[in-house]
């Protein structure tokens, strides 16, 4: 089936899913853009509802086209004008999909108590969030815990920055991060909190064996006092004049140090 109008109801629904977090959560769907990302999603078991693609994309990506055809989902061929309306990137590849979110509502009592986890509080930047998810998966973290104040992990920019890691890594959303950290400590996990300053303890001085959960705070405000209070605080050793690192860079260093000790 072909869509030629930018105001087509299917196109408008796609755009709404792309831009509206509450609509994504309400319907349990997200949007996926790009050949690589869509291929990663399919390999991770993500179920598609609708696919939009241009003739040019179809001709250039025969393997992906064959996979899509085998799924039996609704497929729309779109022109360049419609593709531009669907796109969230400056150089779209001509393929877009509406997909169902994977069931990642994992309860904390199912957590691997011997694994390594990042606990994110109010991380708002989509690029930082996506990069953290990508790094966590790359370094073999057991999962990522995030507060309700974090940016939506299924926002298009997060999904792209994660390079598909959002489909593969275990995610735990909690309404009260300090309470979640207390719960995990009672289960025997070590809870540590990243600070830019205010402590002389370096992450390199901590014993990071077995179950560890590292709390990382907001890009500007850092961690809340409630989170810091229930954790062992630490800082990253720095020799330069920079006062701090952004959330993604700091988290990458922290996760690397934790995995060295596992």
Image (cartoon, rainbow, N blue to C red):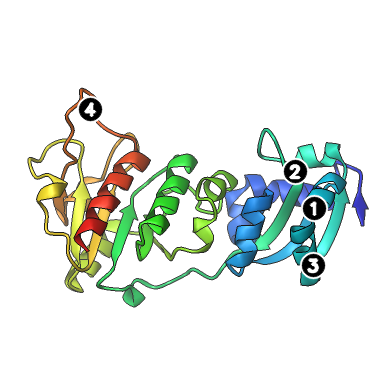
228 vs 62, left or right, is left
Per the image, the residue denoted by label 1 is 52
N-terminal of the pair, mark 1 or mark 2, is 1
Question: What mark, if any, has residue 73 been given in the picture?
Answer: 3
Per the image, the residue denoted by label 4 is 243
Q: In this view, does 180 lie above or below 220?
A: below
Q: CB under 8 Å between callouts 1 and 3? A: no
Q: Where is residue 123 in the image (x, y as percent from the top left)?
A: 39, 44
N-terminal of the pair, mark 3 or mark 2, is 3
Q: Where is residue 199 in the image (x, y as percent from the top left)?
A: 10, 41
Quadrant of residue 222 in the image?
A: top left
Residue 115 visible somewhere in the drawing: yes
N-terminal of the pair, mark 1 or mark 4, is 1
Query: In the rendered view of the protein, which quadrant contains the N terminus?
Result: bottom right
N-terminal of the pair, mark 4 or mark 3, is 3
Q: Position of residue 262 (x, y in %)?
A: 22, 64
Q: In this view, does 46 lie above or below 148?
A: below
Per the image, the residue denoted by label 2 is 86
List the single residue furthest toward the bottom: 110
Residue at 71%, 39% in the rendered image: 92
Residue at 79%, 67% in the rendered image: 73
Distance (Cα) linking label 1 and label 2: 9 Å
Q: In this view, does 54 lie above or below 112?
A: above
75 vs 108, left or right, is right
30 vs 243, left or right, is right
N-terminal of the pair, mark 2 or mark 4, is 2
Distance (Cα) linking label 3 and label 2: 18 Å
Residue at 70%, 48% in the rendered image: 16
At label 4, counting other C-alpha atoms closer than 10 Å, the crowd grade (few under 14, some 14-19, many 20 or more) is few
N-terminal of the pair, mark 1 or mark 3, is 1
Distance (Cα) linking label 1 and label 3: 11 Å
Residue at 34%, 40% in the rendered image: 249
């Amino acid at each position: 089936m072909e869509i030629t109008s930018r105001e087509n109801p299917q196109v408008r629904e796609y755009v709404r899913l792309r831009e509206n977090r509450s609509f994504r959560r309400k319907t349990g769907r997200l949007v996926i853009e790009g050949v690589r990302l869509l291929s990663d999603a399919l390999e991770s078991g993500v179920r598609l509802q609708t696919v939009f693609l241009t003739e040019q994309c179809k001709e250039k990506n025969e393997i992906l086209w064959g996979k899509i055809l085998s799924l039996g989902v609704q497929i729309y061929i779109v022109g360049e004008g419609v593709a531009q309306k669907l796109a969230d990137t400056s150089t779209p590849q001509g393929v877009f999909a509406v997909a169902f979110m994977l069931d990642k509502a994992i309860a904390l009592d199912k957590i691997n108590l011997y694994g390594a986890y990042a606990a994110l509080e109010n991380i708002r930047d989509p690029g930082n969030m996506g990069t953290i998810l990508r790094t966590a998966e790359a370094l073999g973290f057991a999962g990522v815990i995030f507060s309700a104040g974090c940016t939506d992990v299924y926002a298009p920019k997060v999904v792209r920055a994660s390079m598909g890691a959002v489909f593969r890594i275990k995610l735990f959303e909690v309404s009260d991060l300090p309470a979640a950290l207390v719960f995990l400590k009672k289960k025997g996990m070590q809870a540590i909190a990243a600070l830019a300053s205010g402590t002389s303890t370096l992450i390199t001085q901590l014993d990071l064996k077995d179950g560890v959960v590292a709390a990382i705070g907001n890009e500007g405000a850092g961690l809340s006092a409630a989170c810091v209070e229930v954790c062992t605080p630490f800082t990253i050793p720095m020799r330069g004049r920079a006062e701090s690192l952004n959330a993604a860079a700091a988290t990458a260093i922290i996760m690397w140090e934790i995995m060295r000790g596992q």
